[in-house]
Image (cartoon, rainbow, N blue to C red):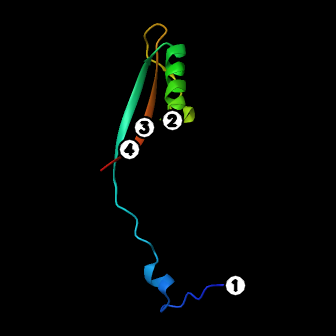
Amino acid sequence: MFQDTSPDTEVSKSWPATLPEHQFETVRHILFGTLTAVRNTMALLHKLNYAEPNDWSQPLPTGRPNEVMAILTKRIRVD
């Protein structure tokens, strides 16, 4: 029923399995536009499987009439 995990078994010799090493970098995306345009862009990036809508900041006013901004910080793998 249970596997023998004593130090001399094959399972323990390969554990922990080594994972491939990848480099990651952080990128930041900033959207500026009307609230409708910003939300539509977020929805499009979600549809393209790039970012979840909840990963974005809340739309923040920029001080310009009818303009908001939203920020997405994403870690991407670079090899």
- In the image, what residue occupies the spot 37% across and 62% down? 20
Question: Closer to the observer: label 2 or label 4?
Answer: 2
Q: Secondary structure at mark 1?
A: loop
Q: Nearer the viewer, residue 68 or 4?
A: 4
User: Would you name the residue on which mark 1 appears?
Assistant: 1
Quadrant of the rendering where the N terminus is positioned? bottom right
Alpha carbon separation for disc pair 3 and 4: 10 Å
Q: Which mark is residue 73?
A: 3
Instruction: Say how many tags the image has.
Output: 4
User: Would you name the residue on which mark 2 appears?
Assistant: 49
Q: Earlier in the sequence, mark 2 or mark 4?
A: 2
Q: Earlier in the sequence, mark 4 or mark 1?
A: 1
Crowd band around label 3 with a 10 angstrom C-alpha radius: few (<14), some (14–19), many (20+): some
Q: Nearer the viewer, residue 16 or 58?
A: 16
Question: Closer to the observer: label 4 or label 1?
Answer: 1
User: Would you name the residue on which mark 4 appears?
Assistant: 76
Q: Secondary structure at mark 3?
A: strand
